[in-house]
Image (cartoon, rainbow, N blue to C red):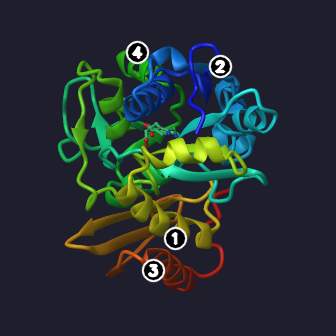
């Protein structure tokens, strides 16, 4: 296998946000360590996506999943980059023709974080408080438990959201614990929310690395840094999501954990206004994860009935 070197570096495509760059750097560090290569054998290439460009509208109005990936995938197909580093939470369940996604780094905490400048917790949030989020899932889960709260649209990166809190636009917001941990920004006050209280988005906290399907050299390199347990968990969660045809327009949550060699999968779907939440769980062998995901999704869908996902 010919290795990349400083003259012909492996090109790592990523979005330009601080979190995306942290994820790309982690990927480079793991590859460099696995093959004993200098950092200069890798080049990080920043690519702007539609999701980065359009900041003034809710993402679901612009066009759902793929908003943060399309331009990066095009760059890979045209050979401008060799691999792409993604937050798996933002990834469609099917990849474009010619691309493969089968390498995952060890997963961070999947939990959502409750973020309030005064360091408070969700449980202690006063009645009638205003919470900022652009996530339909978080909004629906929150209103299901706390119909007294008001939810306002909140977009932008971590820094932007903190600024909005400081400006008094909202009393609190939610972020993924994984993002905060990966940014290493201890200044952000956050309380992890137990997954029993707020089931995370499918694949939350996991990083995936995409490549050209026919690139055997890169496939061999990525195999060396792939985390099998994360792969098994995501296989179950993403099968669940795929069967639900999940997109940004539907509040869906799902989480698989592996304990004592058994896979435990929990899933939830909600009405967007939070008036109804349907949840269920499956348990089985790790190999049966994808089948359990599809079965769980089918069970929830049959309970949901027509119009459950309508949000307009
Ligand atoms: N939708 C944006 C997005 N995609 C991945 C993460 C966090 C990191 C992760 O889940 O791995 C975030 C931000 C957030 O939800 O706070």
State the image coordinates of residue 218 (x, y, percent, origin top left). 60, 41
Query: Disc 3 on helix, strand or loop?
Result: helix
| Residue where numbered disc 4 is placed | 167
Mark 4 and mark 2: span between their CA atoms? 47 Å
Q: Residue furthest right?
A: 78
Mark toward the viewer: 3 or 2: 2
| Foreground pick, 248 / 40 | 40
Query: Disc 1 on helix, strand or loop?
Result: helix
| Residue where numbered disc 1 is placed | 240
Mark toward the viewer: 1 or 4: 1
Mark 4 or 3, nearer chain start = 4
Mark toward the viewer: 4 or 3: 3
| Residue where numbered disc 2 is placed | 8
Whether residue 87 is visible here, answered yes or no, is no
Mark 3 and mark 1: span between their CA atoms? 8 Å
Q: Residues within 10 Å of mark 2 (few under 14, many from 20)?
A: few
Mark 1 or 4, nearer chain start = 4
At x 68%, y 23%, the residue is: 48
Q: Residues within 10 Å of mark 4 (few under 14, many from 20)?
A: few
């Amino acid at each position: 296998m010919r290795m990349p070197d400083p003259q012909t570096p492996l090109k790592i495509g990523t979005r330009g946000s601080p979190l995306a760059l942290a994820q790309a750097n982690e990927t480079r560090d793991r590859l460099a360590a696995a093959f004993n290569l200098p950092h200069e054998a890798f080049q990080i290439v920043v690519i702007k996506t539609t999701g980065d460009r359009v900041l003034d509208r809710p993402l679901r109005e612009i066009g759902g999943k793929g908003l943060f990936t399309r331009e990066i995938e095009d760059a890979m197909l045209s050979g401008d980059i060799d691999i792409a580093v993604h937050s798996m939470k933002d990834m469609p369940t099917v990849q474009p023709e010619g691309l493969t996604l089968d390498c995952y780094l060890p997963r961070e905490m999947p939990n959502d974080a409750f973020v309030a400048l005064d360091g408070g917790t969700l449980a202690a949030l006063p009645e009638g408080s205003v919470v900022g989020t652009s996530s339909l899932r978080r909004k629906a889960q929150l209103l299901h438990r706390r119909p007294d709260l008001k939810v306002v649209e909140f977009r932008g990166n971590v820094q932007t959201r903190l600024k909005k809190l400081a400006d008094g636009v909202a009393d609190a917001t939610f972020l993924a614990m994984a993002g905060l941990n990966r940014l290493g920004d201890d200044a952000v006050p956050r309380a992890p929310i137990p997954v029993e209280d707020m089931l995370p988005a499918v694949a939350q906290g996991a990083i995936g690395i995409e490549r050209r399907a026919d690139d055997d050299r890169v496939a061999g390199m990525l195999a060396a840094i792939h985390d099998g347990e994360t792969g098994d968990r995501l296989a179950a969660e993403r099968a669940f999501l795929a069967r639900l045809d999940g997109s940004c327009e539907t509040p869906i949550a799902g989480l698989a954990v592996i304990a004592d060699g058994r896979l435990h999968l929990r899933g939830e779907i909600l009405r967007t206004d939070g008036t109804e939440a349907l949840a269920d769980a499956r348990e089985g062998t790790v190999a049966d994860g994808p089948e359990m995901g599809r079965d769980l999704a089918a069970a929830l869908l049959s309970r949901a009935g027509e119009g459950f996902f309508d949000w307009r």
